[in-house]
Image (spheres, coloured by chain):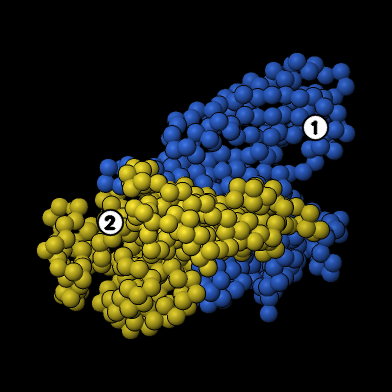
Chain colours: A blue, B yellow
């Protein structure tokens, strides 16, 4: 019998989860839930119903784990605790500063209802967090470095699109290779924001727009661009669609630490992701943690969990004996 | 109150554990145990007694976790189950084919006595296993690649030293960079043994030894060298001591996988270690799992565990709240 999965929302991430479910024979998509008119939404998996989120309570006995595909700004703070009263839930909440509050809310709801809620699943937070945490525990004297990219930042792309005169835009976050190399050599550099990443913007302007003014507004935008070396390229909509249609991403987590009675030995731990599709990889991580949520709850566990709280064995469809025999 | 740790044996690995304990304020070394004459062994940590392994049973109430620093061939198969009757134990058993049997023996002893035994802790098996397993769960359709080096293989160095006419030797395992690059590009190559690693040997010959004969014996040695491109350099003992005195190691674990409705997107997960000191890094991993063994047993858990069975949070000296706030 497979694990019955529901998905709330049908944006990029939800479609990534839908795709990942097909690659995991022990998972089965049973319904997608939308806040809009269900009849207007066509999903890729044949035979699976699209329902209204208002129906969710009626699916209590028909779904083992509900994945919340929404955004961290407004969707998840409300949805994850709400649906944890009826389901085991998994989300990808990624507003780092608000994780403690979100954790507390989900924990309370999930404990009360006897479910498991796994929050902040993906690659950062998620896989990168796991590496940072394990590496920090193994090498307690050292420094962590996280570089993102080369990849599309949807938040930064959106920020550019809000500038008057901009029709469309795509922003790439790019790690500064010289800084990555310095960390790899064990030099423990202190890096400013500018020394860690550059930002490349591909912008489609409306006809007659003041390009110099748009470029200035991008480069001076606080938080998003002002602290970075930013380059702006104006291109046509056709070129944007053709060359910048994907959502690649990735990055590096490095820990540089020392050991020895005189701290004489250096060690570098590096974890790198190169992802053709950010939402599909994130969806794949979520699929593995859907399995974990199901197994943990079957064992009687309840409450909110993060990647830190879950033993790796729960992610695998194989038995502990099999995994020990061929992956240890 | 700190976690009281004992170490059995005082070879390279045990000294690595001793060094790591100093970097973890919540761990305290309380005794080192030897099979030889304790009065002949001087350890680096002042004030800590050296005792005979025959006394171990008397330390039952004075040690929280016992680390077994011995070898996988003969020491650990006997010692780990034996000492699990009195202590929580951690070892670095690394004979992959014999892990299931070792697991079963330690599990039986540890369950019976109410202790936790964590086996096969280090970087491979250990950290590399963790990455292979998590990455395989996240990207179920793909291939795993493990490259070791550049680093000293003690087993291969020993094999060379057993050849008549050889006074001393050091062997480096070196990953074939072109193969690593091909995996990184997502080409999913099928690699032979020869295409994955080369072997570099630095050999000190006895005076008057037949160098051509030694080189031939190394290069034709089955299992160890015959399947590899092997280079042999004859050098002086002084040069060996000066340039090849360390025990650096490291390597790469890569998983190359696909996602998408048409499997159209590639993803590469890469984990890389560059270690100045193999035994000190291994000792540092063990120190983190010593903490885990202690915490798990405090919670009432018993039996044999591997890195797959332990939630990352147990490795950290920090509280779950702290870790969530700054590492997630």
Examine the rendering and report whether any part of residue B301 can be seen: no
Check disc 2 and report its element: helix, strand or loop. Answer: helix
Crowding near pointer 2: few (<14 within 10 Å), some, many (20+)?
many
Quarter of image, res A186: top left
Q: Which numbered circle lies on residue B15?
A: 2
Horizontally, residue B245 falls left or right of residue A59, namely: left
Check disc 1 and report its element: helix, strand or loop. Answer: strand
Q: Nearer the viewer, residue B95 or A300?
A: B95
- The residue sitting at 61% across, 71% down in the picture is A317
Question: Residue B171: x and y, percent?
Answer: 44, 54
Q: Nearer the viewer, residue A149 or A169?
A: A149
Vertical position of residue A224 compared to residue B303: above or below = above
Q: Which numbered circle lies on residue A168?
A: 1
Vertical position of residue A314 compared to residue B213: above or below = below
Identify the chain of the residue marked 2, using the numbered disc in the image: B
Q: Which numbered circle lies on residue A47?
A: none
Quarter of image, res B13: bottom left
């Amino acid at each position: 019998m497979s694990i019955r999965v529901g998905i709330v929302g049908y944006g990029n991430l939800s479609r990534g989860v839908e795709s990942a479910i097909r690659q995991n024979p022990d998972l089965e998509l049973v319904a997608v839930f939308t806040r809009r008119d269900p009849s207007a939404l066509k999903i890729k998996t044949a035979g699976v119903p699209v329902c209204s989120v208002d129906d969710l309570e009626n699916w209590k006995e028909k779904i083992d784990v509900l994945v919340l595909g929404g955004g961290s700004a407004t969707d998840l703070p409300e949805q994850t605790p709400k649906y944890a009263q009826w389901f085991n839930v998994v989300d990808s909440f990624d507003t780092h500063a608000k994780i403690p509050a979100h954790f507390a809310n989900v924990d309370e709801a999930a404990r009360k209802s006897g479910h498991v809620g796994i929050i902040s699943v993906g690659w950062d937070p998620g896989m990168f967090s796991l590496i940072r945490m394990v590496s920090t525990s193994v090498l307690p004297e050292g420094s962590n470095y996280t570089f993102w990219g080369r990849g599309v930042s949807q938040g930064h792309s959106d920020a550019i699109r809000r500038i008057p005169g901009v029709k469309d835009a795509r922003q790439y976050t790019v790690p500064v290779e010289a800084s990555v190399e310095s960390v790899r050599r064990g030099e423990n550099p202190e890096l400013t924001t500018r020394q860690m990443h550059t930002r490349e913007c591909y912008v489609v302007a409306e006809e007659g727009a003041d390009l110099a003014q748009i470029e200035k507004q991008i480069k001076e935008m606080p938080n998003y661009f002002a602290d970075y070396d930013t380059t702006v390229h104006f291109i046509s909509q056709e070129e944007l669609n053709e060359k910048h249609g994907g959502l690649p991403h990735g990055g590096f987590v490095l820990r540089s630490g020392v050991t020895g009675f005189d701290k004489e030995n250096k060690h570098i731990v590096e974890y790198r992701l190169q992802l053709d599709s950010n939402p599909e990889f994130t969806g794949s991580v979520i699929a593995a943690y859907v399995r974990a949520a199901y197994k943990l709850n079957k064992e009687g566990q309840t409450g909110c969990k993060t990647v830190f709280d879950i033993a790796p064995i729960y992610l695998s469809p194989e038995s502990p004996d099999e995994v020990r025999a061929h992956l240890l």
